Amino acid sequence: MSAVLAQIVQIFLVVALAPLITGWVRKVKSRLQGRIGASPLQPYRDIYRLLQKEAVVAHSASWVFRAAPYVTFSAVWLAAAVIPTFTTNLLLAPAADLIALVALLGLARFWTALAGMDVGTAFGGMGASREMMIASLAEPAMLMVSFSLSLISGTTSPTQIIAFILGGGVGIEVSMGLALAALIMVAIAENGRIPIDNPATHLELTMVHEAMVLEYSGRHLALMEGAAMVRLTLFMALIGGIFAPWGMAVPSPEMSGANVLAEMVGLAAFLAKCFVLATALAVFETMIAKMRVFRYADFLGGALLLGLLATIFLYVSEAV
Amino acid sequence: MMAHLFQLPGFDNPLLWILGVPLGSAGFLAVLKDWRVATWVNVAAAVITFVSSLLLLDNRPAPTRLLFIDDFNVYLVVLTSFVGLTTAVFSAAYIARETEAARLSDLHLRFYHSMYQAFLFTMLLALTANNTGVMWVSVEAATLTTVLMVSLYRTREAIEAAWKYFILCSVGIGLALFGTILVYLAAQPVMGDGADAMAWTLMIGRAHDFQPDLLNLAFVFVLVGYGTKVGLAPLHSWLPDAHAEGPTPISAVLSGLLLNVALYALLRFKMLISANGHALTPGPLLIMMGLSSLFMAAFMLYRRGDIKRLFAYSSIEHMGVITFAFGMGGPLANFAGLLHMTMHSLTKSGIFFAVGIISQNAGTKRIADIRGLTSSHPVLGWGFVIAVLAIAGLPPMGVFMSEFLVVTSTFARQPLLAIPLALGLLLAFGALVSRLQMMAFGEPGKVISGHGDASTLSSILALTPLWVHMLLVLVAGLYLPRELVSWFQSVARILG
Amino acid sequence: MGAISQSSYEMAHLIGAAVLMAGFQLLYQRRLSAVLNTFAFQALALAAAAGWQAHIQNAPHLYITAGLALVFKAMIVPFALHWLVERLGIHKTVETAMSIGWTMIAGVALVGLSILLVLPVTANATALTRESLALAMSVVLLGLLMMITRHNAVTQVVGFMALENGLILAAVSAKGMPLVVEISIAFSVLVAMTLFGIFFFRIRERFDTLDLQNLDTFRGDRQ
Amino acid sequence: MLIAAALSALLTLAVLGVLAGDQLWRHRLVYVCCALASAALLVGGLKHLGQTPGTGPAIILPFGLPWMSAHFRLDNLSALFMVIVNVGTVAASVFGIGYCSHLPQPRRVTPFFPLFLFGMNAVLIADDAFMFLVSWEFMSLASWLLVLADHKNPENRAAAMVYLMMAAFGTFCLLTCFGLLAGAEGGYAFSAMRAAPLTPVTSFLVVLLAVLGAGSKAGLVPLHAWLPLAHPAAPSHVSALMSGVMTKVALYGLIRILFDLHGHVSWGWGAALMLVGGITAVLGVLYAILQDDLKTMLAYSTVENIGIVVIGLGLSIAFKDSGEKALAALALVAGLYHMINHSIFKTLLFLSAGAVITATGERDLGKLGGLLKRMPWTGAATLVGAAAISALPPLNGFVSEWLIFQSLFKGPSLPHWAMKFGVPVVGAMLALAAALAASCFVRAYGIAFLGRPRSRAAAAAHHLPGTMRWTMAVLAVLCIVLGTIPVTVTDALSGVIQPLTGVHFAVSADLGWPWLSPVSSTRGSYSGTVLMMTGLSLFVVSILLVHGFGTTKVRRADAWDCGHREDIPESQYTGQSFAQPMRRAFCTSLFAARETVEMPEPGDLSPARLTVRVIDPIWTYLYGGIGRLVDAVADQVNRIQFLTVRRYLLMMFATLVFMLLVVAVRQQQ
């Protein structure tokens, strides 16, 4: 499969897969809570239903409110498009590295927060303020993670990192472990999962992401939800790809024929990883409770410090 | 012996006019009744003096036992007669308004004008005298004339200021005389009896053989003596009050000229010391006094509520900087010191011109009562702003160039000394700027008369000197004439 | 000018010493009138010194100085001051800022300092021997000391003139110094006196006493 | 030639500005001419950048210091900064054409505006210490007068006072710095300084003084105190210049001394600069988040961005001293790129702040809101600026921060342990600052331009003249262009940094034009162009998908807001409430931020009140301490003014005796 084709497949794969993953998480959670729960395919139906509904826009909303869903969605989508899922042979891979990835997610958040404030309601402002506050610690943490990864592998581009790790460039290292922990914490925060935020909540003073998209309805809401789902997939691909890259197809000149086969394997591996991670997430969310708003700082500060430690520990392991 | 000392210059000699005109007009003005005529006679005399001083620039008369002109005093003579001229023009306008306010009687005015010319005469004589004794006499005479003018208003403060001024400066001048005698004693064995042992031109050549210990002793007395007139802390006490209580034109010439003259005398003696070589180097003493003046004045500026005292203290500050520069020595620092003398006298007299009009307009000297000048009197106000910024040492004004040279050359040689210097300058800068902002900006305060805006003839007359000075300072900040530079450099070399 | 014998120098020193003694006496006096008389005596001694110098240096112009000192300082000035004291009704005792004893000790210290200072000056190398230089300097310093240890304006004026006596002493003993100096001294002192007179009247009009303390009570630029 | 003509034109314009009087068209004319002159300077700079020989000919004019008249020279560095400066000045001048009519007193602005432009450009071409400092102070002086333009407001006077004091402080530092470089003989020409050898001590002092002097003008913490006071006090188009451009001139001075005149700065200084830069960035943005005044907020964000640039410079110094020429070049390019970007979007943002103030008369966030509907142009341009300064792709702000991160990530390759451990910390600070900047500008934009108007003034925001709107639009486009063609810019910069770092910076060749890959293609790369294209196409695709699958019906209705139905705009989030989480998280210990709530008793109808107290430690302790010290000493010294004549004589006597003793002692030896 050529890089162009792989890229196109990847782009539509992430979008197609995202609702399923979310649906799977919900399913597992409801099972753990002793409910039957909706089928994993429910999110597809929800989104379709939302698309059919007419969009209600507040009088006080400006064009920013209407543009935000599209910008947010396409930004997240773009970010997801450059994270290798089943193959590292992606056309757009050089266009954005981990830093750009963080920034693209930041772009999405920027617009979401603005949209939250656009209608001029108390909840929207509250959500935006908390979201930005969370991001102001989550982003540095993620940058620290990419810092340590780039120190280990000598590059910031995810494809290169994965290739490096698959090439056996790195064994089990303390800093890798720390980086993984930090990245998971960031992922929880970025996706608004428990204990930071509760994706299923409404009408609570603790809600963050929901508070921002509170005014959305119809297709706009669908886009926002979709963006959230794609973001979740993105992080799973990132974690699974970097810390468990096995099965990922790496292009190499001699095995051009067997390439497609390798990519099939990669696809299967990716699906497996996603469902493992989704189940783990569901279990984790069921086990713990949500924390108070002003404790976020401690949680994410911890993530930031873990990222920092990950880099520092490199020297230690170098030194010995 | 006396004969060849007192040979008078011939008529072709500009010095005769430079000295004769002020002396003669002083006598004439003393008997002249109408003060309006007197002001113009005053100006005319100053013009003649200035023009004839310009003649010195190309043909310098040969030195006699009594008078001489060299690289050092030639520009000071021109400067003095120039500021004398501009101040005369300013005082014409100033006096006119004082009489409107009926603060001065005719007799006072007659006295004032005659004393003004006498004062110019004594200063020019001090500058051109080739004889330590004559120089001393004229500096003393300058003190006496100004004492009378400081007490002109006969107010309590004026009397007190004049009294203080008189006592302190007489004591100082007495000590200076003792120093002069000591120098004579040091020179006499080499030069022989009589006026030769007091003539700069002759002494400087053979200063190498003078008695070094006597020179040391002499320099201490000269430093304390003339230093009192220069206004170096802690000998400065007379200066602020004398500047503050006298008529403003007198403050202008006191700050702009008299201090320079005293400093000139001091530097002449320093030349002897450095020409001698065996004597102790006076540098540390000068640096000490310079820094003490700088800091004392800088802190004083923060507490001044009287506009004239404010700038009197800024004069002390700048004299401190100049003394510091000469204490540092070396071609750059000495050059800077000479330049700073010139720039300071131009700028500071300009500032006092502005201050005179301002205080006449506001009817007070209290800074707190002066507000928003740039709004109420744009021409005057902006001129004042420029002048104060110039004295605070901001480019492109001339003071910046000299401060630039002092600080850089000092820092290159003795960083530890440059740090206090820079600190002191910064302190003074802050005080001046804060006062400037109070007075020049904000809501205009109550104005007794809208005078000083370029409306009437007299106000134009009053404003011209200020702007002329500022123009000169601005030009000097960017370009110095070649001759002046070469004079400065040669003097800097002699000063060592 | 011919060689001057040692003895004539000693004579000069004797007279100089008299001037110095007078200076000490000035510090010692407690009553105004006594101060003025002592000052007259100092001027007298000064005149003698000038005369002697004129004789040994056979420099006739110094006789003028001697005469000036004799007439002006020894007679006119003390008289004028007496008159002023009467005229302005100044109370007759000297108010000291520093106890007489301490003043004397300070005076002695100053004399010691001036001797210390002239020691390095090699003898006979100059027109003036170390001794007379030391004497003159001591007189100057004592005059200054008197000015700063007395409240009363008249005593300050006297101190100032004692200082100038020291100057003249140095000047006359300086061999062959041109007349210009003495003239200037006389001239300045004359002007000084007249000025003082003017001032006293002005001050009399405005203040009740000549004590500088009161003069200083009013000061511009209080905030 | 062109440049000289333009500069002299600026000087004459100042005179015209004085003569302009009250005729508005004359003021407009002056601004038009200013725009033309700075456009000429811009062209001159670009032309010089285009041609290959690094340094232009030295022009020597017969004024300045007597024995070594004035030297001027245009080399690549100054040409680059001339471009940076004059992009800003052109914008500000064009903006001024329309803006000057809204100023309370145009007479107090127009004469000094050209002088300000002149001063900034003269600094860039000065080639000897004296002319450099003259122009430097000239710049400060002109801007001081501009800060005093609205001099009836006591706050502005205080700001101007602090500003001029700090400017003088900086000048004295530079003065002494040049004094050291020049040596005792006074070789004040830059060429002489380059040649002069330096002892370790002098070298240390030179760098220290340069950092203090230029840093105080650029606004490095803790010397930034004047900046947030002075920049907002000036008229907005001047604030734009001061923040967007003048700080760059200050950094030009820093680069000129550290990279050119001195040349061999040790890595330790690089580390120190990075640390200072990091602290500056974080503190600056934290201050900014707490501000309610639009312009003050922007000024603080300037402090932050200066910190980011300085991180780049320090890193470059460290690399250079360790022989890593290529990386030094990378870091320097990153720093310069960020300067360019900041000068553009900060100018844009300040101009839009000016537009807002003109339209509403309000600069307090708490009184604004919903402006996007009233002023769509300004709103859109500001949105671009805000996104750019928040380092969001594909805009220019992100590119430079990406470059800085790339060079930071190479920091640990340095041999020194201090750097190995310091670089990650600085990286964390930088990341924190970037993230906080995003929240800061979401806050500012969301409160000012989105939501509902919080005051009648904001609801009645009026129309603006076209020149103002067009200026902002052009700047916004520049932000996008510089973000999408980064490689072109870095190629242009490579010629500038070659003489400074000794290597020719180039992006790795194997990827080619649109791919910005500084070290190697495998090292991590970025392409604003590709990202932009892909993003746009995905945007279109998502629109097509949504509209393909669903309806396009839209119904306008009241806001849902969980059914709360609050119609009063006061119910919206305000600046303070938005900042609350950040304040609690970061400022509680740093600025001793405290909140006190006064709840009325039940039944009491008086409103509850929340008061927030924030203490700036730097003001309170550093500057306040100095001020108190000066006051105390002044009080003591002031006693000397009120002594009796006798005591003055005593002082004189003591001086005399002291000196005599000194002589006596020194004679005995």
Image: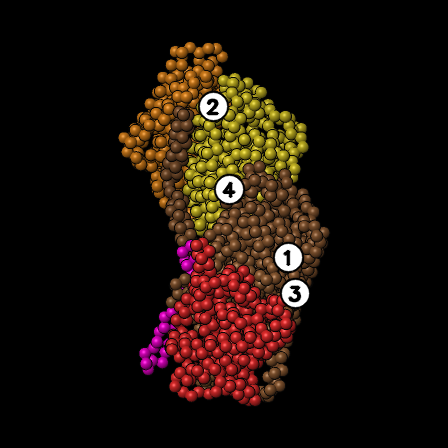
Quadrant in which residue B344 is drawn: top right
Work out whether mark 1 precedes mark 4 in sequence or the reverse, and give the earlier one: 4
Chain letter, disc 1 residue: D
**Letter of the chain that mark 3 sits on in the rendering:** D
In space, the residues marked 3 and 2 are separated at their CA atoms by 81 Å
Q: Residue at x 35, y 27 (%)?
A: C110
Label 4 crowd (10 A; few <14 / some 14-19 / many >=20):
few
* Res. B212 mark: 2
Rounded to the nearest angstrom, the CA distance separating label 2 from label 1 is 71 Å
On whether disc 4 and disc 2 are found on a single subunit, the reply is no
Q: Nearer the viewer, mark 2 or mark 1?
A: 1
Query: Closer to the observer: label 4 or label 2?
Result: 4
Residue B244 image point, x, y percent = 47, 45
Q: Which chain is red?
A: A
- The chain drawn in yellow is B
The residue depicted at 61 percent of the width and 25 percent of the height is B63
Q: Considering the numbered disc 1 on the image, is that residue within a helix, a strand or a loop?
A: loop
For disc 1, the marked residue is: D506
Say if D646 sits above or below D403 in the image.
above
Callout 4 touching callout 3 (CB < 8 Å): no
Amino acid carrying label 1: it is Ala
Q: Give me the disc on residue D514.
A: 3
Residue sitting nearer the eye, D574 or C192: D574
Label 2–label 1 contact, CB within 8 A: no
Q: Is residue B54 left or right of residue D435?
A: right
First to last magenta residue range: D595-622
Q: Which chain is brown?
A: D
**Chain letter tied to orange:** C
Q: Please give the residue where the numbered disc 4 appears in the rendered image.
A: D200
D172 w.r.t. D606: above or below:
above
Badge 2 local density, few (<14 within 10 Å), some, or many (20+)? Answer: many
